[in-house]
Image: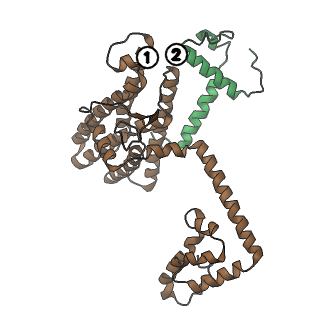
Amino acid sequence: MAFTLYCLLQTAILCVNAVAVLHEERFLSKFGFGVEQGVAGFGDDPGVKAQVLTLIRSVRTVMRGSNEILID
Amino acid sequence: MRQIKGDLWPITSPQRTSKQQEPNMRLRSPVDGLQGSQLFEDTSGAAHGLHRGNQQAGPQAAGLSSQSILSDPMSNMALAYGSSLASQGREMVDKNLDRFIPISKMKYYFAVDTVYVGKKLGLLVFPYMHENWEVSYQKDTPVAPRFDVNAPDLYIPAMGFITYVLVAGLALGTQNRFSPELLGVQASSALVWLIMEVLAVLLSLYLVTVNTDLTTIDLLAFSGYKYVGMIVGVVAGLLFGRPAYYLALLWCCAAIFVFMIRTLRLKLLSEAAAEGRLVRGTRNQLRMYLTMSIAAAQPVFMYWLTYHLVR
């Protein structure tokens, strides 16, 4: 109950780190992520799942550094 | 303080200490005044006449110091250079601060007046009679809160937050549990919950791909409106005991729930659904659930943040 701002910062860092280290083959493909499955098109209804995948992918790209090649 | 001004204000007797504090204060006021404007902008000797009003008690010593400092042309130039450097620094700070906290946008949210605050507070506690919930626009920009009751503002949430911290301290004091650190703990705890709530709402808005013109600051404002209900509940609990706390909190929770639903309905839902017609489709359903959950989270937070204050 007695949260501090530092606690919030720690939580944020840990959550972002958790999203960044999700492994594709072992974990995400079970949810239909797939390494080749991109955004299916720019229709007006991407759906929650596509948005989640986009979010995970963008967090991973940002956290892993722009000069690293994502070896899929 | 006396050490710095030792050469200017020789201390003659202890009885004059209080009188000397004032001249010290007045001499120091142009030195570390607001924004340093008086020090940095008036560097010529003639402008020291403008400071006469501030230095009634010590013109001689100040005149001596100003003459000795400014008669030297090198230090004149140094003062001019220093002033230009300071103004450059101030510009840079303003520009960079504007990047993180959009100051011009914030001014919109604080453009309130007493009538608006009164009406908005009444609306937060009794939203059932209000009919028109739309925000009026003026050539694509929303009208300032002063002219439109439905516009979100940051004045009430900010004041509500501070009042909540103070009332929490008061409530803890009546239970003999108060210590000054607890004020800081309460404040940071409430702030953390607020930030988490705003982040959660932002995340869910992103996931549901709602095309809305709700900005982050709008969400901050809407999340801050619940402090009014919390304060009402806690004050009622302090004055009349626990049953009054529960009654007042129940009333305010229902009021905030209705307020949030009616306000967010126009912003999040599509046109047809906002008018009340039943529209099928997963997307509209998701938006409906999102609105409901945002509105339902408010009473939960209200109870969570106040139940430990009223025993």
Which quadrant, please, contains the N terminus of chain A? top left
Mark 1 and mark 2 in contact? Answer it, CB < 8 Å. Answer: yes
Q: Which residue is mark 1?
A: B286
State the mark number for residue A48. Answer: 2
Q: Is residue B122 left or right of residue A15?
A: left
The secondary element bearing badge 2 is classed as helix
Image point (49%, 23%), residue name:
B211
**Residue under mark 1: which chain is it in?**
B
Task: Say which quarter of the image contains residue B180.
Answer: bottom left
Say which colour chain A has: green
**Residue A2 in view, yes or no:** no
Chain B's shade in the image? brown
Nearer to me, B299 or B210: B210
Residue found at x 26% / y 33%: B130
In this rendering, the answer to whether B98 lies above or below B284 is: below
Placement of B284 over or under B232, stated as above or below = above
Q: Chain of mark 2?
A: A
In this view of the protein, which residue sits in the foreground, B162 or B43? B43
Location of residue B176 in the rendering, given as x and y in whole percent from the top left corner:
34, 54
Q: Secondary structure at mark 1?
A: helix
